[in-house]
Image (cartoon, rainbow, N blue to C red):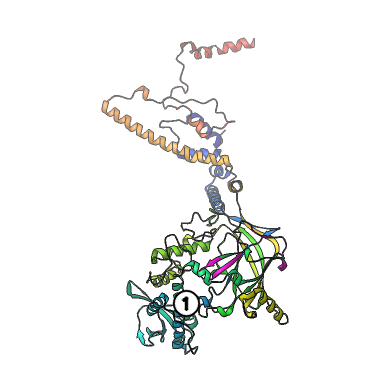
Amino acid sequence: GAMAPGKKITARIKRTLPVKGPQAPTLSELMRWYCLNTNTHGCRRIVVSRGRLRRFIWILLTLSAVGLILWQCAELLMNYYSASVSVTVQFQKLPFPAVTICNINPYKYSSMKDYLSELDKETKKALETFYGFSEGKSKVRRSADEWNSTGSDFFKHIPLLKFEDFSKTVTDLRSGRKRKIEGSVFHKDSSIVNSGDSNDIIGFQLCDANNSSECALYTFSSGVNAIQEWYKLHYMNIMAQIPLETKEKLSYSADDLLLTCFFDGLSCDKRHFTRFHHPLHGNCYTFNSGENGTVLSTSTGGSEYGLQVVLYIDEADYNPFLVTSTGAKIIVHDQNEYPFIEDIGTEIETAAATSIGMHFTRSRKLSKPYSDCTETGADIPVENLYNKSYSLQICLHSCFQKAMVDSCGCAQYAQPLPAGAEYCNYKKNPNWMYCYYRLHEKFVKEQLGCQQICKDACSFKEWALTTSIAQWPSTVSEDWMLRVLSWDKGQKINKKLNKTDLANLMVFYKDLNERFISENPANTLVILLSNFGGQLGLWMSCSVVCVIEIVEVFFIDSLSIVMRRQWQKAKKWWNDRKRDRSGKPPQAGDLERQGHDNPVCIDEDLPTFNTALRLPLPQDNPLPRTPPPNYSTLRLETAFTEQLPDTLEVGQH
């Protein structure tokens, strides 16, 4: 009977598969052999199916399965670096955070009069010129020191201007005359600049000191904003020239700011607070700063067991142009964090009791390759100027300050000094304001590259605050409380305290539940391999052995066949060339040795392609398939054949 296709091809391999020579198998034979012997059923069905339609359907199904495997495995690989978020809540004794408190007014106005007299005089003149506002007799005394001359020169260069109908015609504050000015206009309140009466537009002009035709006009639709921004510009210029020790004396002492203090039900005083000088908020005081190595903790939640302080605000000594609100600013932060009061501080009202309840959360994200966060900030190419643990804000501020020093030659007053730099002031750096405004505009538009360089921190602590306010002191208790507090304050205050000078603050844990939010890898290598196995088994009934088989046949064997063909061609060409040169006929030794049937290859044990490749080669001439031995003693084949009938007969007897 006819042989099955599998047996036919196995027999052919056993018989004729050569290692080298012209009968080396072709790629199509290799593929056919693989399809009949592989464990992936789709491939086998392609070869053994009868009829073109059925074969075409099996090809389509097999290719679809391969496509699905590749797609699903690519999805698995792409999702390998995904993370799952877990939230753990535990009840325990919690460390109390650092609480930094500042007066909204940075320096006592009475102490600053000598430095600010010229600027205040100029500001009052602007109010009189533009708004007809007058205090009557001027209370500002003139100072004969260097601030006077510096200021006058400075105001001459950057006066307040009133713009007419969005044109380049302005009224100068100093001269009161109208003139045309050049430069591109930057509206600081761009979203609302076209609303209201255009005659109200006030601003100032900043020019490049090195190129007077390079100017920028900064306009504001609100006169309040214009005057405050202009005042701050000149104020920063003056403050940058005052040494730090002097500024600390001009600001509030701990005795000035703190009237009473309680923590965890026990009395505390100024020794529990650490002074911290902020360039924009003057002297601030941090409770539980951890500077002496101990961090206070609390084992009970509720307002009775937190921090309770009464603050003396002293509204009468506020700078009327620099700040327009009264009260204190507080920020709750970790002991290793820098308190960015100006960015995220919470304002505290006077004549009120403000309760701030806290919920504590620790968060931890996975770093690369799961997310683009940084563990310590060491991998960010920006120097940390704040001497505190890394945060995104520290990085952004440090990056801007570095760009400021590089571009403008001096440092911006509101941020720490880089090594070797000094703060900008008009005397030494006449160009700094134009440079600063241009640079800040680039920073906001993300053109400096700081937002691209700086990354989030991977782990951070957060205190979520809930604020509630009550009137304090109450009308009935106001009289005796203010008298007692005035007495406590002692001889520093010669008058009875006013309730608008006081603020009551409570900071406490609402509960002692610590929430820990962490990211964990959603996949491990074991899960990934299991998923791969599932996909291969589902679509191709294939295992790891099958994958190795595919690699062996499609890459190693196929490549060896192609390389052998090329080698045969090259060898044949070389031999022909040699023969042509010498004119000799082909030698017997040139013939390849014959192959023979391999007794090991029986149908029960199908050969792999590589074992088949190791079989010796056949030859075209019709000689016996197994060459006869050279030993004459073994030439017995014909004798046995002739004697066989006799032997059989003997056996029958």
| Rendered view: 361 above or below 252 | above
Q: Which residues are magenta?
A: 276-304
Is 442 on the left or on the right of 525, as rendered?
Answer: left
As rendered, which of 242 and 37 lies closer to the eye? 242
As rendered, which of 612 and 45 lies closer to the eye? 612
As rendered, which of 336 and 652 lies closer to the eye? 336
Q: How many numbered marks appear?
A: 1
Residue at 45 percent across and 66 percent down: it is: 446
**Residue 530 percent across, percent down from the top left:** 61, 46
Residue at 50 percent across and 38 percent down: it is: 552
Is 632 on the left or on the right of 509, as rendered?
Answer: left
Residue at 51 percent across and 56 percent down: it is: 377
Q: Is residue 474 magenta?
A: no
Q: Assign a secondary structure to mark 1.
A: helix
Q: Is residue 299 magenta?
A: yes
| Rendered view: 138 above or below 246 | below
Whether residue 472 appears in this view of the structure is: no
Whether residue 107 appears in this view of the structure is: yes
**Residue 294 percent across, percent down from the top left:** 63, 57
Q: Which kind of residue does numbered mark 1 sit on?
A: Asp
State which quarter of the image contains the N terminus: top right
**Residue 179 percent across, percent down from the top left:** 35, 85
Badge 1: residue crowd in 10 Å (few <14, some 14–19, many ≥20): some
As rendered, which of 74 and 611 lies closer to the eye? 74
- Quadrant of residue 96 in the image? bottom right
The residue that disc 1 covers is 114
| Rendered view: 598 above or below 122 | above
**Residue 127 percent across, percent down from the top left:** 47, 86
State which quarter of the image contains the C terminus: top right
